[in-house]
């Protein structure tokens, strides 16, 4: 049985006291549900990694970053490297989010280079793929997802594919309040798992955690996470609201 993993993408929101309070609230919620076996990961902005690390220490909640550079060090002003994230206590890093693709020109080859660097430095990448509204309406979702999955996972050993997380995030559902229906999500998740099976073998495909992301909320989480190939969620807006996020974590725990 695969784990159910809920990652909170706080994006460029909050201030330091807000980040600390939110991390403490999530911790308190987890302590109220000791039997909840979902893996929860908080991905704050870089400057708040230390504050959040302290707030969640010893709780079982994971710490993740929202991005990193391809190189392990070097003259790249303003960038952050994998070993730095590791040293800050991060176990995970979101890579290839659609906002990185859209606003910072990241393509599959660049994201693939980051995935390799993350794996080499002991970080679990949460690698995002997803089609735009235009692509869905043109009926090319399957081709788009296939090209992205092939590209971002290129050259990885099956063992490494088995351990990473893929997040299916239809771009039209991110921050829009529009959610893929559970059937739409399941269809694409199943397609991704079958493709990973073809490319990297069935053991890796069976083990691979595939999250859904795109307006996951307290009232749609349970139905989404109940789908056979949906192994949790990457949550943006609702992860900034402690009680909404608690309800999502509760829904995740109920599927296990
Ligand atoms: C995201 O940014 O990864 C995301 C899924 O955002 P939201 O939940 O707000 O749609």
Image (cartoon, helix red, strand yellow):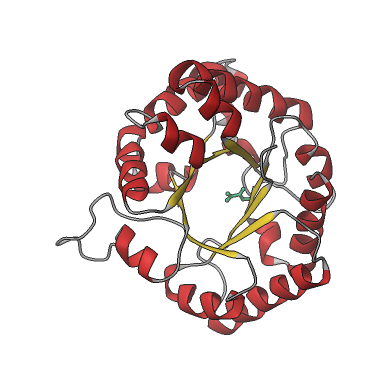
Residue 53 position, x and y percent, is 52, 75
Q: Is residue 182 above or below residue 115?
A: above
> Considering only vertical position in the picture, is 78 above or below 28?
above
Going by the image, does 41 lie left or right of 65? right
Judge by depth and name the residue closer to the eye, 201 or 129.
Answer: 201
Image point (76%, 57%), residue name: 249
Residue 124 image point, x, y percent? 46, 50
Q: Is residue 187 visible?
A: yes
Which sits in the foreground, 81 or 130? 81
Query: Percent x, y for residue 195?
Result: 52, 19
Point out the residue furthest to the left here: 75
**Residue 220 in view:** no
Residue at the image point whose x is 32% and y is 66% from the top: 84
Task: Tell me where residue 197 appears, x and y as whole percent.
Answer: 52, 20
- Image-quadrant location for residue 214: top right
- Going 31% across and 62% down the picture, which residue do you hit? 83
Q: Tell me the quarter of the image containing the C terminus.
A: top right
Residue 55, quarter of picture: bottom right
Residue 25 lies, with reference to residue 66, above or below; the image says: below
**73 w.r.t. 127: above or below:** below
């Amino acid at each position: 049985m695969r784990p159910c993993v809920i990652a909170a993408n706080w994006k460029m929101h909050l201030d330091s006291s807000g980040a600390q309070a939110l991390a403490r609230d999530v911790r308190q919620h987890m302590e109220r549900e000791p039997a909840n076996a979902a893996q929860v990961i908080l991905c704050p902005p870089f400057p708040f990694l230390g504050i959040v690390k302290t707030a969640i220490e010893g709780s079982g909640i994971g710490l993740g970053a929202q991005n990193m550079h391809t190189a392990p060090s070097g003259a790249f002003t303003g960038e952050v490297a994998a070993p730095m994230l590791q040293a800050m206590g991060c176990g995970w890093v979101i890579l290839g989010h659609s906002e990185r693709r859209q606003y910072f020109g990241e393509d599959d080859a660049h994201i693939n280079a980051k995935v390799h660097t993350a794996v080499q430095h002991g970080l679990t990448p949460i690698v995002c793929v997803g089609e735009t509204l235009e692509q869905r309406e043109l009926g090319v979702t399957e081709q788009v997802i296939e090209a992205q999955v092939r590209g971002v996972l290129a050259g990885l050993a099956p063992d490494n594919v088995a351990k990473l997380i893929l997040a299916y995030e239809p771009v039209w559902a991110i921050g829009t309040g529009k959610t893929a229906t559970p059937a739409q999500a399941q269809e694409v998740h199943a397609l991704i798992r079958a493709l990973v099976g073809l490319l990297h073998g069935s053991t890796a495909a069976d083990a691979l955690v595939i999250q859904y992301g795109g307006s996951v909320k307290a009232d749609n989480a349970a139905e989404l996470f109940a789908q056979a190939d949906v192994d949790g969620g990457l949550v943006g807006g609702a992860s900034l609201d402690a009680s909404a996020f608690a309800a999502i974590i509760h829904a995740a725990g109920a599927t296990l």
